Amino acid sequence: MWHGHLAVEAARLGQGVALVSDLMAGELLASGELVEVCRADVRLGAYYFIAPARRWNDSAISALRDWLHGFVRQCMVEPVVTPSR
């Protein structure tokens, strides 16, 4: 697990900058609580949704998988607009 939420919180408290995804900082950017230092489309790797094969179709895992897929698709189609300061 990565502790990107700590980097976001440090940036929010004025302790520097954070390199995180729109998924992690999107709401704070949209509210104006954080601003982008520069506009970029940086891709550092991939994320994987994993679960035991025997539970892949369990209703809870399936629901989370479907929600996550839709959320990521929405973020990619509707980029966050940040206010200029």
Image (cartoon, grey):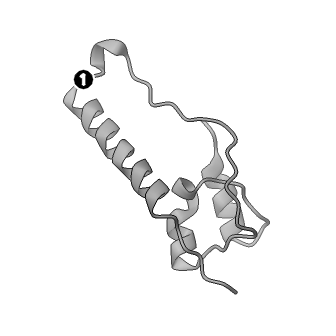
Judged from the image, the secondary structure of the residue bearing numbered disc 1 is: loop
Name the spot of residue 30 as percent of width and height, x first: 52, 74
Q: Quadrant of the N terminus?
A: top right
- Report the residue that reaches farthest toward the top: 54
- Report the residue that reaches farthest toward the front: 77
Q: Amino acid at mark 1?
A: Asn
Residue positioned 30% across, 40% down in the render: 66
Q: Quadrant of the C terminus?
A: bottom right
Neighbour class for label 1 at 10 Å: few (<14), some, many (≥20)? few
Residue positioned 66% across, 69% down in the render: 12
- Report the residue that reaches farthest toward the right: 16
Residue positioned 66% across, 84% down in the render: 84
- Report the residue that reaches farthest toward the left: 59
Tell me the residue that label 1 is attached to.
57
Q: Is residue 40 left or right of residue 79?
A: right
Q: Is residue 68 above or below residue 41?
A: above
**How many labels sit on residues?**
1
Q: Quadrant of residue 38?
A: bottom right
Residue nearest the viewer, comparing 35 with 2: 35
Q: Quadrant of residue 10?
A: bottom right
Residue positioned 49% across, 67% down in the render: 27
Name the spot of residue 76 as percent of width and height, x first: 48, 54
Q: Is residue 75 left or right of residue 46?
A: left
